[in-house]
Structures are given as structure tokens and as C-alpha cells.
Image (tube, helix red, strand yellow):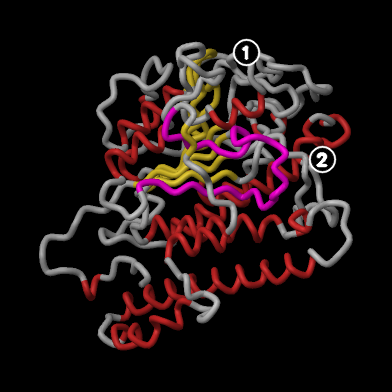
């Protein structure tokens, strides 16, 4: 049985429930090319090779704290133009690297934990229970899934450990495993174990749904149709990619067939599944990894190259690959914007949008993939509705913990926390 979006025509005559608060995190691996993302760094020197855990920004960004209207968008951020007044660019946020573990693995696995280094006993990782699960304690108890974890890593070659491919953790050493296969996520959400017998789940319910649709008002009828069309589109796209993968498996490639799946289509499909889950109340908390850290197996960025590319390998050859890397960063931003558009177009019972009621954050655990710097991370926060002040560039003082933002978001989601991980204070500039 499919969960339906809110429909005014069939709403209970009793007092309507308040619109749910949601939170989602869109994680980008391997940082960004600083000169393309950060304002004021367009003319900065391109770093040469792997410089290790650099703790000072290579750019020329103003180190002082300021809040000002978000100005001209940088090349990587240009796809956000339509949402410029609905986002905050937050710069100057840092994490502290704990010596003894891999730079890439720690930046991903500890991103939403931000535990203070050397405070977690019995582990080499500064990894504690992550923000999404703390928030789910408050907003996830009435949903079928307290949290959902999405990963857009289609590869099955387990080159790296779980720490490179997951940002959600129940606690130290206890992974909340992400789902990487769209079909598996679809079946988890809709329990369509009959999929071999009935190819389209909508065929199972449309007959009854048509009788309901005749009782709906015009607006609800349109919403109803759009919803079922979106589910059918997801099914169609899944079938298409599965057929393509089966065909590619019969071709003699050096790389696995997954390397030749169109990257944008795959990410959008996983994103559509996340949006449906948030829209229908299957969950109020989601994490979304657009790709894994340091996974050298390539991907086909279909809008950029006709051959699969390794994002990680390119990041360590930034001088020669700068143009392609900038295109990859913009490509990832376009996927984020696609989800913003989807969420902004979904209406809620109070006239607001799904995006209005979701804190939806773009971010990475590295400030620059070439240098492995843990400071000045690329962070964009969208949504939040009336509780959020938007359209700003918020540049925090050097050394401001990333956990300050997580503390702020936790409180906006209803938690009563004095502190989160190594936080020192809220970021008041994001709150209306």
C-alpha cells in the first residue's frame, strides 16, 4: 500500500496535525575546488598535489566574522540562482583531524558526529552518535522509518571500508548502513515483494485510486495524479537503469559495468526516492551521500565526459584537471538543486512547501580535496521556512567548530541540547 501525500478533500474533520519538521543532509565527497566554490578565491593559487592535513585556508577569504547578503554566485554555486533567497552560504566552519586514521574516511564518517578528538574511548575514530539519529529521537518516533540512509555508490567492488561510504551512525562502531541500490530502497519503502509478478506497484492500487480520485477537488486531483506519476516515473527509470546495467555486464570493460551507468540519472533516481519518503511521512530524517570518499573506481559523469572518471584521482592532479574538477563540482551542485526544485514544488497542508519544512544541508567533510584540509568547509543550508533567516553569506571566525551548526539545527528541530560534540555556541545568524 502506498502512502499518500496530504489531500485537503479527504482530510479528517478533526483538528489537522501540524506539518512535520524534517531534516536531510546532502554529502559531497572529496571536498570542492576552492577557487570555484568560495567567494573571493577565484584567483587563488591552485594547490599542487597532496599536501596532507592542511589547517590553514589557501584562499584569500576574509578571516573575520561577518553576515551579509549573499552576493554574486561563484561558478560552482551558479545553479543555485533560483534559490538564492532561500539558502545560506556558511563559510569558516572547521573540524579537527584526529591523527591515526585515514583523512578521507574520517572526514566522511565523522562529518555528522564531530566528536571532540581523543574523547571517544576504545576507538581510533572521533565518532559518536550522529546528528540525524539524535534528531530522530524527537521527530522520528511517529514515522515508519526513524531515519533513512541513501548512498549513490553503485559499485560493488569493496575497495574501501565502511568508513568511506557512510555518514550515519547509531553510535561508536555501530553503523546505520546506507542503501545503494534504488530497487532495494524502493522495496524497503513500499514493500513490493511481488515486483517480479507485478512490474508497476501503481497498477496494484490505481483501480481503487480512481474511485477516490473522483471524490477529490481539482487541486487535490492534480496533486494525486502528480504523485502517482512520480512513482511510476521512478519505476520506469529503475527498470531502464537495470536493463542498461544488464547489457553493460556483457561488454568487456576494464572497469565494472556500474562505471558506465549515467551518473546524473542514478543520483536523481535516488533523490526522487528520498523526496517521496519525506513527502509521504515515511521518514522525517534522511542522509544522502552523493558519492563515497576515496573510491578510485570511476563514474560516468554523462554531462562532462564520455568516459568514466575517478573523482579522487583527479583531485590529486588538480593543476592539470582543474577544468574537469570544476565541472564535477558544478555537476554535484546541479543534483542538489534538482532536489531543491522537487521539494519546493510539493505543497503541504498549511500552504507551505516540503522545502519550507525541511532543513536541507549541502556539505563536505573536506575544505579542499587536494589538500585534505579540515577547515573552512563548504556548507550550504536551505529550507527551514519561517524559522530560518536566508539569503545570507555567513562567514564564521577561524576555528569555529562545524558542530556549532549541528547544535543550531538540533535545537531548530526541537532538541533541548546544551552542547553537541565539540560545539561552542549556536550560529544565531541562521535563525529568524
User: For the point 79% across and 21% down, which residue is it?
Assistant: 50
**Image quadrant where one finds the C terminus:** top left
Q: Quadrant of residue 403?
A: top left
Give the residue pinned by disc 1. Answer: 99
User: For the point 63% across and 51% down, which residue is it?
Assistant: 334
Q: Which residue is situated farthest in the left direction here?
A: 14
Magenta segment range? 146-171
* Horizontal arrangement in the rendering, residue 128 relative to residue 315 (left or right): left
- In the image shown, does 5 or 293 lie closer to the viewer? 293
**Image quadrant where one finds the N terminus:** bottom left
Spot occupied by residue 267 in the image (x, y as percentages of width and height):
62, 55
Dot label at residue 323: 2
Q: CA distance from mark 1 to mark 2?
A: 32 Å
Against 382, residue 54 (above or below) is: above
Res 15 visible: yes
Q: Main secondary structure of the magenta part?
A: loop
Amino acid at each position: 500500500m502506498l502512502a499518500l501525500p496530504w489531500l485537503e478533500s479527504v482530510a479528517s474533520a478533526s483538528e489537522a496535525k501540524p506539518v512535520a519538521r524534517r531534516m536531510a543532509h546532502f554529502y559531497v565527497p572529496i571536498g570542492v575546488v576552492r577557487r570555484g566554490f568560495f567567494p573571493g578565491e577565484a584567483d587563488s593559487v591552485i594547490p599542487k598535489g597532496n599536501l596532507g592535513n592542511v589547517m590553514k585556508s589557501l584562499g584569500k577569504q576574509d578571516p573575520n566574522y561577518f553576515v551579509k547578503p549573499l552576493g554574486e554566485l561563484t561558478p560552482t554555486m551558479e545553479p543555485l540562482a533560483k534559490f538564492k533567497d532561500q539558502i545560506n552560504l556558511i563559510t569558516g566552519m572547521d573540524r579537527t583531524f584526529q591523527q591515526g586514521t585515514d583523512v578521507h574516511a574520517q572526514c566522511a564518517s565523522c562529518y555528522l558526529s564531530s566528536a571532540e578528538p581523543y574523547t571517544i574511548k576504545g576507538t581510533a575514530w572521533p565518532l559518536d552518535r550522529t546528528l540525524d539519529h539524535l534528531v530522530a529521537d524527537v521527530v522520528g518516533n511517529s514515522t515508519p522509518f526513524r531515519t533513512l540512509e541513501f548512498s549513490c555508490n553503485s559499485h560493488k567492488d569493496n575497495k574501501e571500508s565502511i568508513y568511506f561510504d557512510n555518514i550515519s551512525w547509531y553510535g561508536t562502531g555501530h553503523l546505520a548502513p546506507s542503501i545503494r541500490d534504488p530497487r532495494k530502497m524502493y522495496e524497503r519503502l513500499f514493500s513490493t515483494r511481488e515486483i517480479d509478478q507485478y512490474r508497476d506497484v501503481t497498477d496494484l492500487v490505481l483501480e481503487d485510486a480512481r474511485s477516490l480520485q473522483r471524490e477529490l477537488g481539482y487541486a487535490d486531483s492534480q496533486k494525486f495524479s502528480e504523485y502517482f506519476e512520480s512513482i511510476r516515473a521512478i519505476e520506469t527509470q529503475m527498470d531502464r537503469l537495470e536493463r542498461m546495467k544488464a547489457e553493460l555486464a556483457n561488454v568487456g570493460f576494464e572497469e565494472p559495468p556500474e562505471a558506465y551507468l549515467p551518473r546524473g540519472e542514478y543520483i536523481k533516481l535516488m533523490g526522487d526516492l528520498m523526496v517521496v519518503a519525506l513527502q509521504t511521512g515515511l521518514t522525517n530524517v534522511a542522509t544522502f551521500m552523493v558519492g563515497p570518499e576515496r573510491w578510485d573506481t570511476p563514474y560516468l559523469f554523462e554531462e562532462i565526459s564520455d568516459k568514466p572518471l575517478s573523482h579522487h584521482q583527479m583531485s590529486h592532479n588538480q593543476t592539470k584537471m582543474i577544468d574537469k574538477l570544476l565541472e564535477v563540482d558544478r555537476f554535484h551542485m546541479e543534483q542538489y538543486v534538482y532536489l531543491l526544485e522537487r521539494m519546493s514544488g510539493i505543497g503541504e497542508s498549511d500552504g507551505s512547501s516540503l522545502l519550507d519544512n525541511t532543513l536541507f544541508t549541502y556539505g563536505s567533510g573536506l575544505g579542499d580535496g587536494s589538500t585534505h584540509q579540515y577547515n573552512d568547509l563548504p556548507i550550504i543550508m536551505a529550507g527551514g521556512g519561517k524559522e530560518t533567516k536566508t539569503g545570507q553569506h555567513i562567514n564564521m571566525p577561524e576555528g569555529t567548530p562545524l558542530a556549532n551548526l549541528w547544535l543550531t539545527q538540533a535545537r531548530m528541530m526541537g532538541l533541548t541540547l546544551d552542547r553537541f560534540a565539540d560545539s561552542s555556541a549556536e550560529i544565531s545568524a541562521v535563525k529568524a
